[in-house]
Image (cartoon, rainbow, N blue to C red):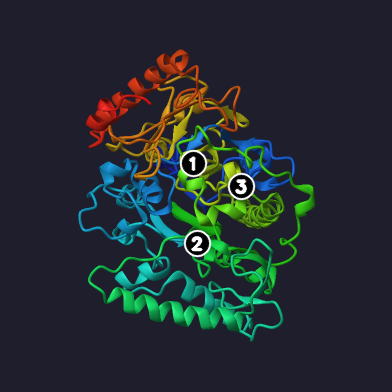
């Protein structure tokens, strides 16, 4: 080899080696953080062992809390399904987004605001959603899969309803319908029999009798609907799934929870190699509270205490009227409520088991360190508190919800946030952790609080449009005020010291003889509420401001 050719070879080799070293040293493009959003329906804040529950065991939710952040005081911005879910998706309060009740699932004037998944999809994320969809369907347009609407609302979309898809899947699992026998009743959700508990609204009559009564009731209602001034009969509806409690006669692997979780596991297998946002929306522990063994009876009713507030006389409560409604009366029966709680805990435990399988699939695909996992619920369940069931009130059991977040390397394991927060803060938090551009919303990122810092906001607000009770709740770490946006409303306002009265048994204003002593504290909370209403351009600002605390 000539000297010139040798030098040319050395120079070329040096360039090649340098290029190779440069390629090795060049930083790899930072992978996008994925999002796994897990949501339940009607799960109250203390239905987790990491929240201090000594009966219910939730090892997988405890894992999320231990490896990430646990929010002690997280709240639904509106304790009912459709509005709560609209807030979760958009980060906008119910008046901002224009969804204030369950009948607003398809309002034509819903605000044209983006959801967090709209924003992620525009920034290269693959988005899919599985399970219960119970909010305006136009928000579902961003997903790559077909999102199934809930129940009768599916008629507006032309998409197969969720319950129909589930029943179809049940048949594929060879779980065919059968005739009910003995004391069994028919579960409308699965179309399969269950053995009712004594608390069940249809307990004590055979299914054939209920079928006859149902036909007659439908016939009478059709006749009433034809009248010019038809009014639906109010009170307990024995045909409502809200009143169903018992042991469901299907295998545990074939429940609604298993159906949704299976779809999510399949989705993870498909999307594992691309940036994704995947939502898993479980329907339970929302009623019907019927479940199969081994979850039915897993937490025996005999080992469960009735709520401390079950016998609350409600003589100074803004919810005295609601607690006296016909459908509430059986929830002052301690034996009934213990059985209800047994079923409820079993449904939550089943969810926890499936959450464990979903987290294991993240581990299997090497996605754990690169995925923000959020677990929450749309609202809570009174579960016998103050002798009530369901939601739609601003007491703790209904409005206070679970919230967990995990992102290794960004969220310190074992973080605990005590400052009150709400659903309205989730959109900004997701965008922050996923390094997305900020979007205008009514909430703020919770990252500072997770990092152990204060952000200047020490309260959260929840809202409900009821005419028979308070419309607003404002909560700080210690104090909670319930009030109305109607200056003329005769309901009593309520101030609770949650530090000394966590069960909300002692209203310090209203008819309390020492109310004057506590009015200054109530006014401080009202001032914070007015500032929040002004910031969010609430149409109720004027009414709240004009109301004199009662």
Q: Please tell me which residue is depicted at 43% across the width and 50% down the height of the picture.
A: 80
Which residue carries the number 1 mark?
320
Q: Is residue 289 left or right of residue 73?
A: right
Q: Dot 2: what SS? A: loop
Give the distance between the C-alpha atoms of the residues marked 3 and 2, in whole angstroms. Answer: 16 Å
Measured as percent of width and height from the top left, residue 2 is found at 42, 42
Dot in front, 3 or 2: 2
**Mark carried by residue 202:** none
Between 328 and 366, the one nearer to me in the picture: 328
Q: Please tell me which residue is depicted at 64% across the width and 37% down the height of the picture.
A: 51
Q: Is residue 504 left or right of residue 251?
A: left
**Mark carried by residue 236:** 2
* Residue 453 against residue 56 in the figure, above or below: above
Dot in front, 1 or 3: 1
Q: Residues within 10 Å of mark 3 (few under 14, many from 20)?
A: many
Q: Residues within 10 Å of mark 2 (few under 14, many from 20)?
A: some
Q: In which quadrant of the rendered view does residue 249 lie? A: bottom right
Q: Please tell me which residue is depicted at 63% across the width and 53% down the height of the picture.
A: 348
Outermost residue, bottom side = 179
Measured as percent of width and height from the top left, residue 12 is found at 40, 41
Instruction: State which tag comes first along the sequence, 2 or 1.
Output: 2
Q: Is residue 459 left or right of residue 531?
A: right
Measured as percent of width and height from the top left, residue 223 is found at 33, 79
Instruction: State which tag comes first along the sequence, 1 or 3.
Output: 1
* Residue 114 against residue 159 in the figure, above or below: above
Between 108 and 341, the one nearer to me in the picture: 341
Residue 269 seen: no
Between 282 and 498, the one nearer to me in the picture: 498
Q: Dot 1: what SS? A: helix
Which residue carries the number 3 mark?
384
Q: Dot 3: what SS? A: loop
Query: Can you say which quadrant of the picture contains the C terminus?
Result: top left
């Amino acid at each position: 080899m000539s000297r010139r050719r040798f030098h040319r070879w050395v120079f070329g080799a040096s360039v090649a080696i340098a290029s190779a070293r440069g390629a090795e040293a060049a930083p790899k493009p930072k992978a996008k953080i994925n999002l796994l959003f897990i949501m339940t329906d009607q799960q109250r804040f203390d239905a987790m062992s990491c929240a201090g529950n000594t009966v219910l065991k939730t090892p997988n939710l405890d894992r999320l809390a231990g490896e990430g952040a646990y929010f002690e005081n997280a709240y639904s911005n509106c304790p009912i399904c459709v509005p709560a879910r609209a807030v979760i998706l958009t980060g906008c309060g119910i008046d901002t987004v224009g969804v204030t009740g369950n009948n607003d699932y398809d309002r034509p004037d819903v605000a044209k605001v983006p959801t967090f998944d709209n924003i992620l999809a525009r920034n290269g994320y693959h988005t899919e959603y599985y399970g219960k969809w119970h909010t305006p369907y136009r928000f579902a347009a961003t997903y790559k899969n077909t999102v199934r609407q809930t129940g009768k609302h599916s008629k507006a979309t032309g998409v197969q309803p969720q319950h129909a898809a589930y029943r179809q899947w049940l048949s594929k699992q060879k779980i065919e319908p059968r005739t009910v026998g003995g004391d069994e009743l028919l579960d409308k959700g699965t179309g399969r029999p269950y053995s009712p508990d004594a608390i069940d609204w249809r307990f004590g009559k055979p299914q054939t009798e209920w079928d006859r009564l149902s036909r007659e009731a439908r016939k009478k209602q059709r006749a009433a609907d034809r009248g010019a001034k038809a009014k639906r009969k109010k009170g307990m509806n024995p045909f409502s799934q809200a009143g169903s409690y018992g042991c469901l006669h299907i295998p545990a692997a074939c429940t609604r929870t298993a159906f949704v979780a299976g779809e999510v596991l399949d989705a993870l297998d498909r999307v594992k190699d691309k940036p994704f946002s995947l939502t898993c929306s479980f329907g339970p522990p929302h009623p019907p509270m019927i479940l199969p063994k081994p979850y039915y009876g897993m937490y025996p009713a005999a080992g469960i205490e009735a709520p401390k507030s079950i016998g609350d006389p409600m003589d100074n409560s803004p919810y005295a009227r609601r607690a006296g409604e016909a459908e509430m009366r059986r929830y002052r029966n301690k034996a009934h409520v213990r059985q209800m709680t047994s079923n409820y805990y079993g449904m939550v435990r089943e969810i926890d088991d499936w959450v464990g399988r979903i987290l294991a699939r993240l581990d299997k695909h090497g996605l754990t360190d690169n995925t923000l996992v959020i677990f929450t619920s749309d609202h809570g369940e009174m579960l016998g508190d103050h002798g009530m069931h369901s939601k739609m009130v601003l007491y703790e059991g209904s409005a206070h919800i679970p919230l967990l977040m995990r992102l290794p390397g960004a969220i310190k394991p074992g973080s605990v946030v005590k400052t009150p927060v709400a659903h309205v803060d989730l959109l900004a938090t997701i965008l922050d952790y996923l390094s997305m551009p900020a979007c205008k919303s009514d909430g703020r990122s919770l990252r500072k609080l997770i990092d152990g810092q204060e952000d200047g906001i020490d309260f959260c607000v929840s809202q409900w449009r009821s005419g028979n009770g308070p419309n607003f709740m404002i909560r700080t770490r210690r104090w909670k005020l319930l009030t109305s946006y109607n200056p003329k409303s005769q309901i009593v306002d309520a101030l609770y010291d949650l530090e000394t009265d966590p069960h909300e048994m002692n209203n310090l204003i209203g008819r309390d003889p020492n109310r004057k002593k506590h009015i200054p504290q109530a006014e401080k909370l009202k001032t914070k509420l007015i500032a929040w209403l002004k910031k969010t351009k609430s149409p109720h600002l004027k009414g709240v401001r004009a109301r004199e605390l009662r």
